[in-house]
Structure formats: structure tokens, C-alpha cells
Amino acid sequence: MGTYLDTCQSDFWRAVFQHELDYIVNALSNHNDILSVGCGPAIIEGEMQELGYNLTGLDVTAEALQGAPDSIRTEIGTAEKMGFPDKSFDAVIYVTSLQFIDNPEKAIQETKRVLRPNGDILIMLLNTNSQYFEEQTSNPESHMSSIKHTNLGEMERMVSKYIEVKAEYFLGIMGEEIFENSDPGTAALYILRGTLDNQKI
């Protein structure tokens, strides 16, 4: 786990996280209580806490949460069975974590349950059609090689059964270069965003 944390602290990954942080903060500027599912060492979440958000991080093991800042509340548990009361959060975020969850549909059902009325969901998916993803998954030591769900269309349709979302491509990564990009072939992320519709079954 130490090696993973060291990797996260590299200049390259800190730059990636900064782009992701800026996107999330811009999208959720009107929210306060936020749940991050599959947060790991919660680097982005710690930065959000410093900006005034009230963050809760959820991950499956204490090892996964190792290194998470003391300033954020962390809970050990699964996305498919969250230990939170109904309507606990203004927003729920998945920062490249949903594709690694065994049953993402159950996770989205739980997400809907813990969201407050008019709560937002923001899901950052790895763009599995990108050159960046191909490069990462060609390395067996990359955490991306353990991805469980690679069909972006299926993921979007599944989420849309419960919460209406809009999608966009975001963030170009070519080697060590990081740049603004919305091209489906080169953007590293595919982002789904939506607001809870209480009429949607």
C-alpha cells in the first residue's frame, strides 16, 4: 500500500488529481455533505475537506483507506450495502471506482437511497476506449488491470435506470502530458452526472 501511496504523491498523479478536483468542485459547488465511494487514500477528498466540504469516504478495507486524512470521516463497507441512513448526503461521487465494484447496479441503488432530494451523483469512469487506458492495462502491475466493467454504454444505461445522467469525455493524458480534452478516443475519463429525480423508479 505504501508503494501505491508513493505513486499517488508523484508530480504526475498530483496533477491528474488536481484536474479531477477542479472538475468535482465546479460541479458540486452548492453541496456540503458528500460521500465518496471507493475513495482509497482519499487524496482528492482531503483537498475537498480543506475547501470546506464535509466528506465521508467509503472503501472495503482498512488497508484501502490507509493514508486517508484524519480530517475526513471514513467507513469500511461495500458500495452494494452502505451502512448509512436514507437521505444522508447532498452528493455521492465515484472517482474511477464504480468499474471495479462487483455489482455496480446494486451500488447505484444504494447511492439513490442515501441521496437527499435533489442530490447529485458524479461518476468518473475510465474511458476504456482511450489510448491511455490501453497503455495502463498493458501493465499487469497497474491497478487498472483489475477492472471489472469496461463497456461504457452498458454502465451509462445501468445508471440511467435509477438516475437520469448526462455524459461527457474529460481530460487528455498522453504519456506524461495532461491537457483539456473531450475527444472520445483520447480523453482519459468518461463522466456521468445527474440529479436525483424522485419520480424515477
Image (spheres, rainbow, N blue to C red):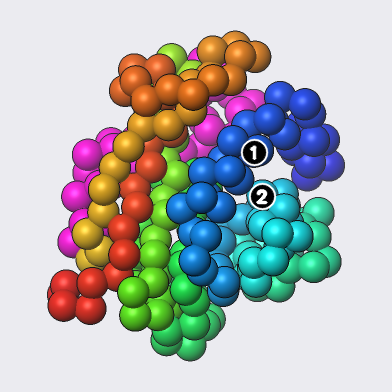
**Mark 2 or 1, nearer chain start:** 1
Q: Quadrant of residue 120?
A: bottom left
136 to the left or right of 116: right
User: At 70% from the left edge and 59% from the top edge, which residue is drawn?
Assistant: 51
From this viewpoint, is residue 64 visible? Answer: no
User: At 22% from the left edge and 59% from the top edge, which residue is drawn?
Assistant: 164
Mark 2 touching mark 1, by CB under 8 A? yes
Q: Is 128 situated above or below 90? A: above
128 to the left or right of 100: left
Label 1, residues with CA under 10 Å away: few <14, some 14-19, many ≥20: some
200 to the left or right of 92: left
Q: Which sits in the foreground, 81 or 91?
A: 91
Q: Position of residue 181 (x, y in %)?
A: 43, 22
Q: Which amino acid type is marked by label 2?
A: Ile
Q: Which residue is mark 2?
A: 44
Find out whether residue 162 is within the magenta segment. no
Q: Which residue is mark 1?
A: 17
Q: Quadrant of residue 14?
A: top right
Q: Position of residue 83 (x, y in %)?
A: 53, 81
